[in-house]
Structure formats: structure tokens, C-alpha cells
Amino acid sequence: MHGKDPLHYAQALKNTIMKYIIRSIKYFFYFALLTTLIICALVMTGLAEGDIDTMFRGGSSAIWKMALFFVAIAAVYPKVGFITRRISTDKNWNEMIKDPIFYVLFLMLIGGAFFGLMMISQCSAVAQRMIGLEAAVAATIVSILSLGNAAGLVLCGFISDKIGRINTITAALVLAVVGLAMVWKSGVGTPNQMLFTVGIVFVGFCFGSFMGVYPGFTAEQFGLKNNGVNYGIMFIAFGVAGVAGPMIMTKKFAATGSYSGAILIALAIAVAGLVLSFVYRAMSKAKK
């Protein structure tokens, strides 16, 4: 037997270090981007001022402190937070519905589809009645929503291959909460078309992300062999959201003459979906 060349171990160590550094840099930019999106949303909704000196105690120096904090988190996260994708043992539909994780995924899909189907079905009406846009402009907003949906479908499928399905879903739900808050805020007081449009793009993008990620997510959780049937059953959640979302919005408008209440319900359901993403993490970790 021949021992491996020391150069082999040196190369392996080098590759491991390089992967770690690349992941750390990647997660630093993810955290920075997410924080930037949240700050932009707060400024655009009027919940925070756009001046850095008044937004943060210490002004611009606080930005450097935040950057250092992100560096520290990014240095640790690749070690403890990176999810290695694995395909679970194949389960048929009967075995799948006996697994408690199925119901977490099912409810999480309702949370991710509810706000998207609600807004897609009523986007034009909301744009005209809540924001005061003309029919032609409202139709353009619907097209923008569709483009956001398509972008989320493609990009988040790709992103989930890199950072993991549940990480992508969690990020999408955070962005959905921000987007729905922007849509709601756009109709409070003086209507704000720009705020409404940006919020709609976020909502469409996040809805598309669920459609792009969930087939692979279901296969990873319950196996590839029966994924056609298994995902068909999982997709019933989409049908539930497709009935409930538009129905709640039309009934709320009929009862109050406003879409605000329905949008807040959608926001609450998105938050519930976000909570469920962490419940899934805990359950998945407990099974290992």
C-alpha cells in the first residue's frame, strides 16, 4: 500500500479553504442584500427616513459596524448553516402523508401561494380602486407582476440549487412580507404608484420562487421514485390557496370597500409561512 502524496493533502486543504472563503463571501453579500432590501422598503413605506445620519445611531459609522457584523456571521454560517442536498428514501403517497413534515411543507406552500394567487387574481382591480390607476396602466402593472413571477420561477430554482431549498424559501417569504407591506402602505393616505409597483414585483417574484423550488423540495424530502404522485398531492395546497386567496379578497372588499384588510391577512399568512420554515428546520434536524 502506498501512502498518499503530501501534496495531495495540501491540495485538498487548499480546496476546502477556498470553498469556505467563497461561501463566506457569498453569504456576506446575501446578508447585505437582504438588509438593503429591508431598509429600502422601510424608507419607501415611510417607516424610516432616508438620511443615514438619522436612520442609525452613529450615522455612517454604523454602516461599518453592520458590515463587520455581517463578516463575522458570514464566517460562521457556511459551517453551521449550509445545507447539503440529499435525496431521502423513496416514499409512496401513503407513507408521505403519514410523515408530519408533509403537513409543514403543505401549509408552507399554502402560505407561499396564498398571497401570489390573491394578488394575481385581483391586481388590476386593486391598482384601479386602491391606487386610482387607469385601466391601461393597471394592465401594465399586471404584466409587471407576471414578469416578476417568471423571474422568481427561474432565478430561485437556480439559487436553491446553490444554497438549499429551505434557505431559498425562507428568503422568499421575508421578501414577500416586505412586498405585501409595501402594497398595503401604498394605499394608505395618498396613493403611491411607485411603492405599489415595487411591492407587486416582490410579491410576483416570491410567488414564482415557490413554483420553481417546490417540485425539487418535495423530491428531496420524499424521494424521486414517486415524485409525480407525491408532488401532485402536495400541489393540492396550491388549489386551496387558489380558492381561499381570491375569495377572501373579494369578500373583504365587498364588506368594507377596501382591499387593505385582505392584504393584511395575506401578510399574516406569509409570516406564518416564514415561521413554518423554521419549524421545518427543527423537525428536519431532529430526524437526523
Image (spheres, rainbow, N blue to C red):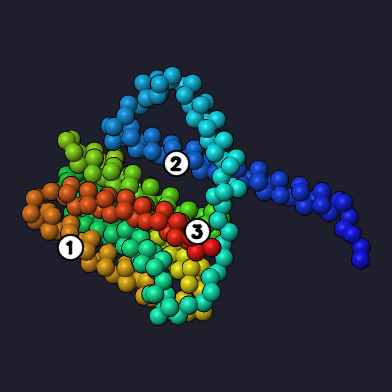
Residue placed farthest to the front in the image? 286
What label sits on residue 98 in the rendered view? none
Q: Rounded to the nearest whole Å, what is the CA distance between mark 3 and mark 2? A: 25 Å
On screen, residue 65 above or below 266: above
Amino acid found under the numbered disc labelled 3: Lys
Q: Quadrant of residue 233?
A: bottom left
The residue at the point 16 percent across, 35 percent down is 189
Nearer the observer, 12 or 147: 12
Other-residue count near label 3 (Cα within 10 Å), few / some / many at <14 / 14–19 / ≥20: few
Residue 170: in sight, yes or no? yes
Q: Could you tell me which secondary element the residue under label 2 belongs to?
A: helix
Q: Could you tell me which secondary element the residue under label 1 belongs to?
A: helix
Tell which circle, 1 or 3, labels the residue nearer the N-terminal end.
1
Other-residue count near label 2 (Cα within 10 Å), few / some / many at <14 / 14–19 / ≥20: some
Amino acid found under the numbered disc labelled 1: Met
What label sits on residue 34 in the rendered view? 2
Give left or right: position of 69 versus 206.
right
Q: Residue 31 location, x and y as percent?
A: 49, 40
Nearer the observer, 204 or 271: 271
Q: Residue 209 location, x and y as percent?
A: 42, 58
- Residue under label 3, please give it: 285
Tell which circle, 3 or 2, labels the residue nearer the N-terminal end.
2
Other-residue count near label 1 (Cα within 10 Å), few / some / many at <14 / 14–19 / ≥20: some
Q: Quadrant of residue 99?
A: bottom left
Amino acid found under the numbered disc labelled 2: Leu
Q: Are marks 2 and 1 in contact (CB under 8 Å)?
A: no
Q: Rounded to the nearest whole Å, what is the CA distance between mark 1 and mark 3? A: 37 Å
What label sits on residue 247 in the rendered view? 1
